[in-house]
Image: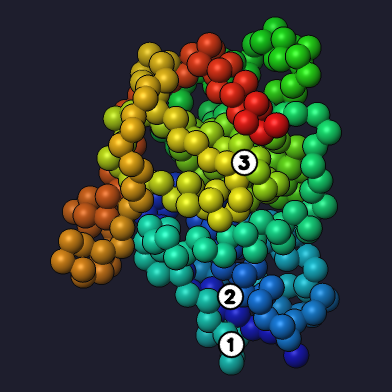
Amino acid sequence: NAKKVCMDTVWNPEYLSSPLNYAHFLLAQVYPIIVFLVENKDLESNDMIEIAIDSRSRHWDSQLIDILLPWNTTIRPACDSLGEHAVISVPHLSFCTEKYWERAHILGAYLRARYHLIVPKVPAALIVIREDNTSRNWDVDGLLSACEDQEWIANWLSAGVNIICTSWTRFTSISTVAWTVGLASVFIAGHGAGLANIVFLRPQAQVIELDAVNHTNHNRQFYGLLAQDLGLNYTKIWVDANGHRLADLRPLSNCTDRRSDGSHIAGQSAEELTAAGILPYNTPAAINRNELDFLVARALISEN
């Protein structure tokens, strides 16, 4: 008898602008599924599992089956095709609540065991860059030019540090993503779905999230909450359009699923997302080479 699970998840706001929405797949589907399965004491390896997932996310089927490889998994198109089943519910704006991230360490431990990730022998800084053919229209300038500078990469290698520059698409196997991220002592990326991959880092690794200083009131700080429960050392770095790192001591706050009167924010209209503290990402941001060198060096020192 197969264990039957309905994945009942409301699409996070960024799905509207990014239909592939990798962060939603990994953090609003894979994460709660893994926690459910790991904590289900009746399940054993090789047991059969049937999971029903919204058809809009079916382009991630092969990655999900790979992640769930210890079990014999079948993906169904609709919950009503399952018969009697369990339900995993991820309500609207779950990313905006601290409680949602409290079991992320279960996902991290599972993925490290699933992909046999070990502590890297050589310090490595992983820089995530955006694919030019993606629909995303915001990124931090300066990362791509650094990654294209072979002399810069060679200089770091001569100092005993491996600089790994990478980007992923929907066609990248999840094992490739896991093994690449698993090599990193330091993970550097602009705010965006690529940061979801910090779930493959080992505890105590360094995470540097770059963001435009004018976005300090945008409240998309859930990657910091994720990093905290994964046992990672997380730093949010604010930069301006000229590539300079700026000090900003205002406390970080995450988005919210509630209005000031305590009522639940149910939809994704512009007014509702503003009430949640989720505002458009449209301010230019850049990091110059000196600042990037400083961040890599400081992170490696902290890591050691």
Q: Which residue is mark 1?
A: 85
Please give left or right for residue 213 compared with residue 106 in the image.
left
User: Contact, CB < 8 Å: mark 1 with mark 2?
Assistant: yes
Question: In this picture, is 39 found above or below 301?
Answer: below
Residue at the (53%, 51%) spot, across then down? 228
Residue at the (79%, 53%) spot, across then down? 115
Q: Residue furthest left?
A: 261
Q: Which mark sits nearer the N-terminus, 3 or 1?
A: 1
Q: Which mark sits nearer the N-terminus, 2 or 3?
A: 2
Residue at the (67%, 81%) spot, across then down? 40
Question: Can you give x and y, in whole percent of width and height, for residue 95 in the image?
Answer: 42, 58
Q: Amino acid at mark 3?
A: Thr
User: Looking at this view, is 268 or 83 the one in front?
Assistant: 268
Q: Which mark sits nearer the N-terminus, 1 or 2?
A: 2
Mark 3 burial class by Cα count in 10 Å: few <14, some 14-19, many 20+: few
Mark 1 burial class by Cα count in 10 Å: few <14, some 14-19, many 20+: some
Mark 2 burial class by Cα count in 10 Å: few <14, some 14-19, many 20+: many
Question: In this picture, is 119 found above or below 230?
Answer: above
Question: In this picture, is 263 found above or below 60?
Answer: below
Q: Which residue is mark 3?
A: 169
User: Contact, CB < 8 Å: mark 2 with mark 3?
Assistant: no
Closer to the eye: label 1 or 2? 1
Q: Which residue is mark 2?
A: 52
Q: Amino acid at mark 1?
A: His
User: Looking at this view, is 68 or 291 the one in front?
Assistant: 291
Q: Is residue 272 visible?
A: yes
Question: Can you give x and y, in whole percent of width and height, for residue 16 in the image?
Answer: 38, 52
Please give left or right for residue 14 compared with residue 58 in the image.
left
Q: Amino acid at mark 2?
A: Ala
The answer for how far apart the CA atoms under marks 2 and 3 are is 24 Å
